[in-house]
């Protein structure tokens, strides 16, 4: 079955789940979840897997074992498709690639690559991505320079990153219920691809 966007009432489902995040609500609306939320992302993944690689669709159940927030359900649907991430909630479609909360060892290798000659190519790619509306890095960054690096380094903004990610956000609109959603997802994946390619080439162990 081809992917035709999310034409059903996924917005209503997620907004209701935000208000009443309970098993009672979820069970009462399980059929809406399966048809209007889960079904479309399965169709999307089936269509894009041959192009981008293996798929993992995340469960809507939250892992609450070590969390202070005991809400049992996520208020979004998400998947990885190859090296890329896609998420949809009641308000936006989010696409991205890179590494959230990488290990200190990985960050050390990343910063060494950024500080070296290869970092010039990354900086140029990031400049192009940002000009095209891609967010690189996110809000969680070091305030000062990482240990061993000068605050005057020409690529200090990239050295300060703690999450090395590239992201694209689209506010939900009528297009989400059509094939235009697929076009935006593919465009978003291609827009963030330069970061992933640079990481694969220059940061071992990812």
Image (cartoon, rainbow, N blue to C red):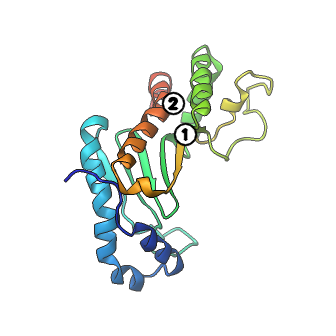
Determine whether the residue tagged by mark 1 lies in a helix, strand or loop: strand
- Mark 1 or 2, nearer chain start: 1
Q: Is residue 144 above or below residue 95?
A: above
Q: Position of residue 57 (x, y in %)?
A: 33, 55
Q: Quadrant of the C terminus?
A: top left
Q: Is residue 135 left or right of residue 206?
A: right
- Provide the residue designation for mark 2: 195
Specify whether residue 112 is in view. Answer: no
* Other-residue count near label 1 (Cα within 10 Å), few / some / many at <14 / 14–19 / ≥20: some
Residue at (59, 42) in percent of width and height: 163
Q: Nearer the viewer, residue 147 or 153?
A: 153
- The residue indicated by pointer 1 is 165
Q: Is residue 140 above or below residue 7?
A: above
Residue 177 falls in image quadrant: bottom left
* Closer to the camera in the image, 175 or 156: 175
Residue 47 drawn at (x, y percent): 25, 45
Q: Quadrant of residue 77?
A: bottom left
Q: Position of residue 90 (x, y in %)?
A: 49, 64
Above or below, comparing residue 38 to residue 106 in the picture: below
Q: Secondary structure at mark 2?
A: helix
* Farthest-out residue, top: 117
Q: Residue at x 76, y 33 (%)?
A: 145
């Amino acid at each position: 079955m081809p992917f035709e966007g999310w034409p059903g009432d996924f917005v209503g489902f997620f907004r209701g789940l935000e208000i009443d995040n309970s098993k009672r609500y979820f069970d009462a609306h399980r059929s809406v979840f399966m048809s209007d939320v889960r079904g479309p992302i399965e169709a999307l993944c089936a269509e894009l897997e041959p192009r981008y690689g293996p798929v993992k669709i995340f469960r809507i159940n939250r892992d609450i074992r070590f969390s202070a927030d005991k809400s049992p359900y996520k208020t979004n649907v998400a998947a990885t498709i190859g090296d890329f991430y896609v998420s949809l909630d009641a308000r936006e479609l989010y696409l991205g690639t890179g590494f959230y909360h990488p290990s200190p060892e990985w960050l050390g290798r990343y910063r060494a690559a950024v500080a070296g000659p290869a970092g010039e190519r990354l900086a140029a790619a990031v400049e192009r991505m940002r000009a095209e509306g891609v967010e690189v890095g996110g809000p969680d960054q070091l305030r000062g320079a990482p240990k061993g690096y000068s605050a005057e380094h020409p690529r200090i903004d990239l050295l300060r990153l703690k999450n090395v990610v590239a992201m694209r956000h689209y506010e939900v609109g009528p297009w989400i219920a059509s094939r235009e959603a697929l076009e935006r997802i593919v465009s978003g994946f291609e827009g963030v691809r330069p970061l992933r390619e640079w990481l694969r080439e220059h940061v071992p162990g990812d």
